[in-house]
Amino acid sequence: MSNNNYPSESHHLNHWIFSSEDSLREIKNECNEKARENWRYVFSQSISSGTNNSVDLEQLFLTTKEEETLVSYFGKQLVEFCNHKQLPFLSKYNASLIYQRFFTHQSVMDYDPRIIIFTSISLALKLEEYGLHFTLEKLFGDVPGLNIRDVFLHELTVCNTLKFHLYILNPRNTLEGLRLLYKKYYIDIFRDDESSEKKTYLLNLLSKVIIKAETYILMVLHTL
């Protein structure tokens, strides 16, 4: 990848930024219909063998909107879990994006989001080598009813769905750049006459703004 064209040639922009909400909706509708077709086939085989012949299949299927509601709900649970484990913003953001990307091309009717949220967290930690501080047992061992082996087994499925596009442009670098520029040009240059106490106050204020921005970014990711 040419440095002159980065990040315009990145997978992040070329494959995961959509031209409109309608185009994204179309992808999700196609995913939903594909899952329906798969389950129609499964049930047809069951019916032909003499079981479940009274089941109204269409009543069992989720709509695209219902899938989005579930994805949004469990996405927020992902963030809450990361907060509980005191994981850094970058881990929360990467896990959230991996999770959302996965369910852009996969259906809740095929994959349980209660497993995928933890698989997404595991992959996010490995991407930044933060996972060296944890084992899956240490990280997820206190989650009631969670089979840690399932978390591990879904990693390849998630990576394949994302086409191994695991490099993620994150807003943290931009926010940190803003903080450094603010410090350089506003505090160090334009505010030479201010006391060190005032400068410290301004930097702390900016840090709070950045933390609030990070919170809103995660909220937007998991909001319908």
Image (cartoon, grey):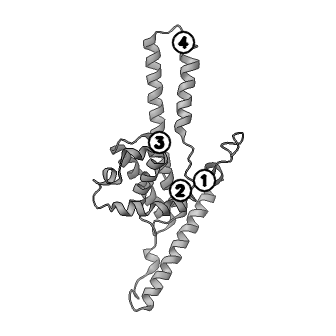
Q: Residues within 10 Å of mark 4 (few under 14, many from 20)?
A: some
Question: Which residue is label 2 attached to?
Answer: 101
What secondary structure is found at the residue carrying circle 4?
loop
Residue 121 position in % (x across, y down):
42, 51
Q: Residues within 10 Å of mark 3 (few under 14, many from 20)?
A: some
For the residue pair 89 and 213, the one nearer the viewer reads as 89
- For marks 2 and 4, the one nearer the N-term is 2
Question: Which residue is label 1 attached to?
Answer: 16
- Judge whether 186 appears above or below 34 on screen: above
**Could you tell me which residue is drawn at 54 percent across and 25 percent down?**
180
Q: Quadrant of residue 144?
A: bottom left
Question: Which residue is label 3 attached to?
Answer: 90
Cβ atoms under marks 1 and 2 closer than 8 Å = yes
Q: Which mark is residue 191?
A: 4
- For marks 1 and 4, the one nearer the N-term is 1
Q: Quadrant of residue 186?
A: top right
In 3D space, how far apart are the residues under numbered discs 2 and 4 (Cα atoms)? 44 Å
What secondary structure is found at the residue carrying circle 3?
helix
- For marks 3 and 1, the one nearer the N-term is 1
> Which residue type does callout 1 highlight?
Trp
